[in-house]
Amino acid sequence: MSNIKIAQKSPYTVEVNSGDKKVWCSCGHSENQPYCDGAHARKETGMKPVVCKFENSETVYFCGCKHSKNGAFCDGSHNSL
C-alpha cells in the first residue's frame, strides 16, 4: 500500500561529484532526507528508493514533496500541494 509522506514542500539542493551514487527516498518517511534509510520497508509503504548515479559534478535538486513527475528530481509539483 502506498503511503507517501511529504518531507518538505521544496527541493533539497545537493552538490554531487562525478561518480557519486545517491539513493533517494521516494516515500518521505526517511529520517535522513532526501536519502533512503529503509523506512519504506519498516512502514510497509509499498515504495522503493531510487538509485541516482551522476556522471558530472553539479548541483541537483532532489524532490522533497515526493510528488514529482521527474522521478527523484524536483519538477515544481510542490507548488500545487
Image (cartoon, helix red, strand yellow):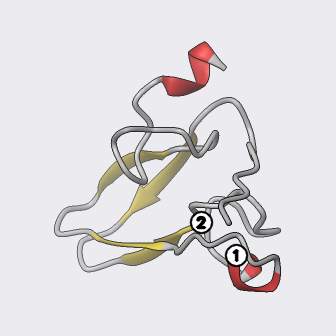
Residue 32 image offset from top left, x and y in percent:
75, 69
Residue 54 to residue 61: above or below: below
Q: Residue furthest front?
A: 1
Name the residue located 71 percent from the left edge and 57 percent from the top edge: 28
Distance from label 1 to label 2 (Cα)?
Answer: 8 Å
Q: Quadrant of the C terminus?
A: top right
Q: Residues within 10 Å of mark 1 (few under 14, many from 20)?
A: many
Residue 28 or residue 23, whichever sits in front:
28
Secondary structure of the residue carrying numbered label 1: helix
Residue 67 to residue 14: above or below: above
Q: Amino acid at mark 2?
A: Cys
Residue 67 image offset from top left, x and y in percent:
54, 39
Name the residue located 75 percent from the left edge and 78 percent from the top edge: 44
Asked if residue 11 lies left or right of residue 7, the reply is left
Q: Quadrant of the N terminus?
A: bottom right
The numbered mark at residue 25 is 2
- Answer whether labels 1 and 2 touch (C-beta < 8 Å): yes
Q: Quadrant of residue 12?
A: top right
Q: Quadrant of residue 15?
A: bottom left
Residue marked by disc 1? 40
First of labels 1, 2 by sequence position: 2
Asked if residue 72 lies left or right of residue 80, the reply is left
Residue 80 image offset from top left, x and y in percent:
59, 14
